[in-house]
Image (spheres, helix red, strand yellow):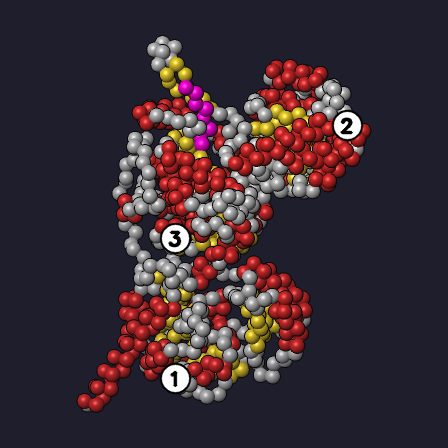
């Protein structure tokens, strides 16, 4: 199906695109010295940096942009001077720091992001220089008021809850949309973009943007660099369209994301929800080709990547080798000797389902009382990343439930629920993982969640050690609402809201046979160890390379204002039809063939009254009255409507129903493609179409003399498209032995006789002109959809066969900018009518001059 983004681009700038000029190199400072609050997309387009500038970098480089840099910053007193100074080091727990492990060794990685600490304005220049020189990091310093509204405001109050399916039902429950928070979000993204612009070499660098904090950043960068190779990865869930569409700035964010070249998601569900939003709100349909999913958007193909991130195996094995971990393991084994430990490690927020996990543990102990005194849930609560009343309420509920259960089911020396709410190092967590029989993740909605991966690696132990040589075992109970769930096929998946079922899953996890635990563990470890963070980053980078392979071959223009900005990318041979060139060729030609589609070409698709206007009738009449012209309307419409509408134009040729019926100029008789055709197939096809029409609200059947067409443009986009695909398969099966073809088009499924195409119409017209010794030396063919592509192809075949003059002027033109066999395009029906009117004026003036010469003689 052709995307709406191609079907009608009325919102593009009218006229030809501006000529591409040789840009001047804009020199950029290495660090920004003055931070500021910037308003929404107020860039001066004239001052933007072109990606055609010559590069100064010999090898490709990746710029990783994230909300926070993978840097630890500590304020210390200098030993010599006694003055306070900053000490910086890599944050080895940061996923972004490990990205480089999957990239080519020669590739340089540069980081752009903010720091986790406040840096005084007077120190920002020095800190920037240190981080750039020592760590290849470019810090973005956000003013305090912007930072608070951007992160704690829009990110944590609006995007984070919404992406985790919590709607703002009231001012007290979820909070209302605050436009000032959105403006701060935009301002922060713009500051990040300026930091990228300072250091980028657009022809050589790749940019990889991370997570929901920076979802409008692609638009800022694309405004400056039309051909920039840019990817985006979302580390949180993407909600269904019913949830996402409640966001007041929904289209702004979608359009900004579509300015990236590759969009990454953890699971197919998240990608499917995003694609559904694009379909419902922007009219874009995705296509799958050779296993890759792509969205066509103004001539660009945006790739969709589905790949869960992983853990860093080297880091985990390093942790397992540490003596601190070994001693901690021995300490915990003594502490929980004779007990079966279940482990949970979660951030303290409202979506982790810790309270449901605690209740499930209680239910399991009450149902299977022999485990009282033996089973212990150790729940590690990481510090909350956000703040607010909801976090306080959920923490209070967890503590209250734990205390109640411990009082009710606990005994001296036995505490069923152990809460650990202090920050633990990865080494300490690894010790708890090692001694635990099962890990529990019961989030009600979560992104990836790497806790199960870390647990599996810790249970495996160090490669080559004595412990790892013996069979290892582990069990996972994982919520089906967590991003890692699809990749852990051996886990027990649960609906955490169902406390009773989750309780039974806990019981199964600790009661199942050791052999079964070993088999599940082996399966999980094989996946986790192979699909680590290096595998993830390498796969994403390779797909980004593939998606951007033809960037510098395409002709690109940036159009639109604010978040309506997008880049139109066209093939170098595909260009806009110039009025001057066609009028000059038209004036010189002696035998002209003009073939015009009707709907979407001379009649807008959105028009309710489909009959031609007086203006269109006048233009076509003038073209037909020129004795040098052979003019045809070639349409999928029925012959009755076309004959009635164009009755005044006696010299007009008409091809109806894609050429099944033809009426030549000055002839009142219709010629049928195949006399005596058998239409018994209609009795077979129509009941199938009725079946889908009854179950698809907004669809209807159009019955023609030679064809049946099922229309679904007024149906739900996703459902209509799915029904169309199903109907296509159904009809092809039912009509397999009939002389018909079943085709899908723009919001239609059509069944028609075999061999009936607009291309055959064009072939007949050119052949008759050749036979009458009026071989065409000027061809104008204009259409807007797939059926018109057959005419464009036939023009080339006729030139090769010599039916069209070799000294020809050929203008095959499609309406809208889209992949086409035509070499030219016009933006919309308005431009088509203007072009035809100009040609009609030439014919009219020439005809008048001939009459004047005849009367004077």
Judge by depth and name the residue closer to the eye, 609 or 299. Answer: 609
Q: Percent position (x, y) of residue 690?
A: 63, 71
- Residue at the disc numbered 3: 564
Residue drawn 64% across the image and 35% down it: 355
Work out how far the residue at label 2 is from the one at label 3, CA to CA, in angstroms: 61 Å
Residue stretch in magenta: 68-75
- Label 2 or label 3, whichever comes before in sequence order: 2
- Residue at the disc numbered 1: 649
Judge by depth and name the residue closer to the eye, 428 or 647. Answer: 428
Work out how far the residue at label 1 is from the one at label 3, CA to CA, in angstroms: 43 Å
Q: Residue 786: in sight, yes or no?
A: yes
- 480 lies left or right of 224: right
Residue drawn 51% across the image and 50% down it: 244
Kind of element beneath mark 1: loop
Specify few, some or many for label 3: CA neighbours under 10 Å numbering under 14, 14-19, or 20 or more: few
Which quadrant is the C terminus positioned in?
bottom left
Q: Which mark is residue 372?
A: 2
Work out how far the residue at label 2 is from the one at label 1, CA to CA, in angstroms: 93 Å
Kindly report which numbered mark, 1 or 3, lies closer to the viewer in this rendering: 3
Q: Quadrant of residue 83?
A: top left
């Amino acid at each position: 199906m052709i995307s709406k983004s191609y079907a009608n681009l009325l919102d593009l700038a009218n006229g030809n695109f501006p000529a591409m000029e040789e840009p001047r190199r804009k020199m950029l400072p290495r660090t920004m010295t003055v931070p500021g609050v910037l308003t929404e997309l107020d860039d001066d387009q004239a001052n933007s940096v072109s990606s055609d500038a010559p590069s100064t970098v010999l090898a490709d480089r990746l710029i990783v942009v994230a909300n926070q840099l993978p840097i630890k910053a500590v304020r210390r007193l200098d030993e010599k001077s006694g003055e306070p100074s900053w000490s910086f080091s890599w944050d080895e727990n940061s996923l972004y720091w490990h990205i480089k492990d999957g990239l080519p060794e020669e590739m340089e990685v540069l980081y752009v992001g903010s720091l986790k600490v406040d840096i005084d304005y007077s120190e920002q220049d020095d800190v920037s220089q240190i981080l750039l020189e020592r760590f290849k990091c470019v810090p973005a310093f956000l003013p305090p008021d912007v930072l608070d509204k951007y992160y704690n405001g829009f990110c944590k109050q609006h995007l984070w809850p919404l992406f985790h399916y919590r709607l703002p039902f009231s001012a007290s429950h979820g909070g209302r949309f605050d436009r000032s928070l959105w403006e701060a979000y935009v301002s922060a993204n713009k500051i990040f973009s300026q930091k990228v612009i300072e250091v980028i070499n657009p022809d050589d660098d790749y940019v990889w943007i991370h997570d929901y904090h920076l979802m409008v950043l692609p638009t800022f960068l694309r405004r400056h660099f039309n051909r920039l190779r840019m990817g985006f990865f979302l580390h949180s869930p993407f909600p269904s369209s019913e949830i996402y569409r409640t966001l007041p700035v929904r289209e702004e964010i979608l359009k900004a994301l579509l300015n990236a070249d590759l969009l990454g998601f953890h699971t197919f569900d998240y990608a499917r929800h995003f694609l559904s939003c694009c379909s419902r709100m922007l009219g874009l349909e995705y296509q799958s080709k050779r296993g890759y999913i792509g969205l066509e958007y103004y001539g660009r193909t945006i790739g969709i990547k589905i790949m869960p991130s992983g853990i860093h195996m080297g880091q985990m094995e390093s942790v397992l080798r540490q003596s601190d971990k070994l001693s901690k393991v021995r300490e915990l084994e003594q502490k929980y000797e004779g007990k079966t430990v279940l482990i949970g490690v979660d951030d303290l927020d409202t979506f982790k389902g810790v309270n449901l996990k605690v209740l499930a543990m209680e239910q399991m102990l009450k149902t299977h009382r022999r485990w009282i005194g033996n089973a212990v849930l150790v729940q590690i609560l990481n510090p909350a990343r956000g703040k607010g009343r909801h976090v306080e309420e959920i923490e209070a509920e967890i503590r209250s439930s734990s205390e109640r259960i411990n009082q009710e089911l606990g005994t001296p020396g036995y505490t069923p629920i152990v809460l650990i709410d202090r920050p633990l190092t990865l080494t300490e967590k690894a010790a708890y993982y090692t001694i635990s029989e099962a890990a529990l993740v019961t989030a009600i909605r979560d992104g990836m969640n790497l806790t199960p991966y870390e647990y599996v690696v810790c249970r495996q132990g160090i490669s080559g050690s004595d412990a790892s040589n013996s069979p290892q075992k582990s069990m996972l109970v994982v919520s089906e609402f967590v991003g890692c769930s699809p990749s852990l096929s051996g886990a027990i998946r649960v609906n955490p809201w169902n406390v009773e079922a989750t309780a039974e899953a806990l019981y199964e996890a600790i009661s199942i046979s050791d052999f079964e635990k070993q088999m599940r563990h082996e399966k999980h470890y094989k996946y986790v160890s192979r699909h680590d963070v290096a595998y993830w980053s390498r796969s994403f980078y390779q797909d980004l390379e593939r998606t951007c392979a033809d960037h510098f071959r395409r002709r690109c223009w940036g159009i639109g204002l604010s978040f309506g900005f997008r880049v139109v990318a066209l093939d170098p041979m595909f260009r806009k039809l110039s009025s001057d060139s066609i009028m000059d060729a038209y004036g010189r030609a002696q035998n002209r063939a003009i073939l015009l589609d009707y709907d979407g070409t001379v009649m807008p698709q959105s028009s309710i009254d489909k009959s031609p206007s007086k203006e269109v009738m006048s233009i076509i009449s003038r073209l037909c009255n020129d004795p040098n012209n052979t003019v045809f309307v070639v349409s999928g419409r029925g012959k009755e409507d076309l004959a009635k509408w164009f009755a005044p134009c006696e010299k007009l040729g008409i091809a109806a129903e894609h050429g099944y019926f033809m009426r030549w100029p000055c002839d009142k008789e219709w010629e049928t493609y195949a006399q005596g055709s058998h239409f018994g197939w209609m009795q077979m096809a129509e009941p199938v179409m009725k079946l889908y029409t009854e179950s698809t609200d907004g669809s209807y059947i159009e019955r023609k003399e030679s064809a049946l067409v099922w229309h679904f443009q007024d149906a739900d986009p996703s459902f209509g498209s799915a029904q169309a695909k199903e109907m296509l398969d159904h009809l092809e099966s039912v009509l397999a032995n009939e002389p018909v073809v079943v085709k899908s088009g723009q919001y239609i499924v059509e069944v028609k006789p075999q061999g009936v195409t607009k291309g055959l119409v064009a072939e007949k017209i050119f052949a008759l002109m050749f036979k009458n010794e009026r071989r065409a030396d000027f061809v104008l063919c204009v259409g807007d959809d797939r059926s018109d592509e057959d005419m464009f192809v036939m023009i080339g075949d006729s030139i090769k066969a010599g039916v069209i003059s070799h000294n020809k002027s050929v203008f095959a033109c499609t309406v809208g900018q889209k992949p086409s066999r035509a070499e030219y395009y016009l933006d919309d029906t308005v431009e088509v009518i203007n072009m035809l009117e100009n040609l009609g004026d030439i014919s009219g003036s020439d005809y008048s001059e001939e009459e004047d010469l005849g009367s004077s003689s």
